Image (cartoon, rainbow, N blue to C red):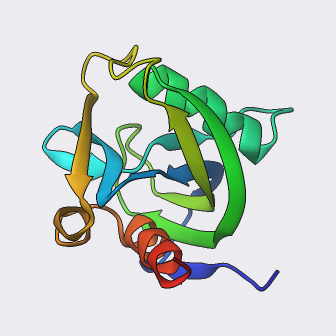
């Protein structure tokens, strides 16, 4: 595997957080979360002692209520955020996977501010989603 592509420009002191995200399609629609008006792929931080595929399955369930299976790795990309909810700069070091979900198992997550949405791919790519997440969706589309 090659070095991850970097989005954003890390400056000053920042911490790096290992993350994992999923690209899940249902026909022409992409599983997303709308949080504070922005679209995101399902996923998040990898907990200590957890591997990225296990994190995907856990995060999809927590955020969407869907039972999931992580598939093939898409690749790795990092995104630098100058400000975060925690107030400090952060570089998200993400591994992206294709995944599938059991459509009968959910659609409502455990996090009240996360609205589960299935959106057309073009809507996601034209949104304010992070560039590293858009990159992963484009990489996935290129292999379909």
Q: Would residue 115 be found to the left or right of residue 132 on screen?
A: left
Q: Quadrant of the N terminus?
A: bottom right
Residue 102 versus residue 122 in the image, above or below: above
Q: How many marks?
A: 0
Residue 125 position, x and y percent, is 25, 71
Task: Pick the residue in front: 70 or 17.
Answer: 70
Residue 129 position, x and y percent, is 28, 61
Residue 113 position, x and y percent, is 24, 23
Q: Would residue 46 be found to the left or right of residue 66 on screen?
A: right
* Residue farthest right in this picture: 49
Residue 18 position, x and y percent, is 67, 51
At horizontal 55% and vertical 51% (from top left) the residue drawn is: 21
Task: Pick the residue in front: 136 or 38.
Answer: 136
Q: Would residue 70 be found to the left or right of residue 12 on screen?
A: right
The quarter holding residue 53 reads: top right
Residue 95 versus residue 119 in the image, above or below: below
At horizontal 43% and vertical 69% (from top left) the residue drawn is: 137
Task: Pick the residue in front: 71 or 81.
Answer: 71
Residue 122 versus residue 55 in the image, above or below: below
The quarter holding residue 67 reads: top right
At horizontal 62% and vertical 50% (from top left) the residue drawn is: 20
Q: Would residue 72 be found to the left or right of residue 137 on screen?
A: right
At horizontal 72% and vertical 60% (from top left) the residue drawn is: 72
* Residue farthest left in this picture: 37
Residue 7 versus residue 30 in the image, above or below: below
């Amino acid at each position: 595997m090659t070095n991850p592509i970097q989005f954003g420009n890390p400056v000053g002191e920042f911490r790096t957080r290992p993350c994992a995200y999923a690209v899940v399609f249902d026909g022409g629609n992409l599983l997303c979360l709308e949080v504070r008006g922005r679209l995101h792929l399902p996923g998040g931080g990898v907990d200590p002692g957890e591997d990225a595929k296990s994190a995907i399955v856990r995060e999809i369930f927590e955020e969407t209520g869907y039972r999931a299976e992580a598939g093939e790795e898409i690749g790795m990309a990092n995104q630098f955020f100058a400000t975060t909810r925690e107030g400090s700069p952060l570089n998200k070091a993400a591994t992206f996977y294709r995944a599938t979900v059991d459509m009968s198992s959910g659609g409502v997550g455990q996090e009240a501010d996360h609205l589960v949405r299935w959106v057309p791919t073009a809507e996601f790519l034209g949104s304010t989603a992070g560039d590293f997440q858009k990159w992963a969706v484009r990489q996935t589309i290129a292999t379909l």
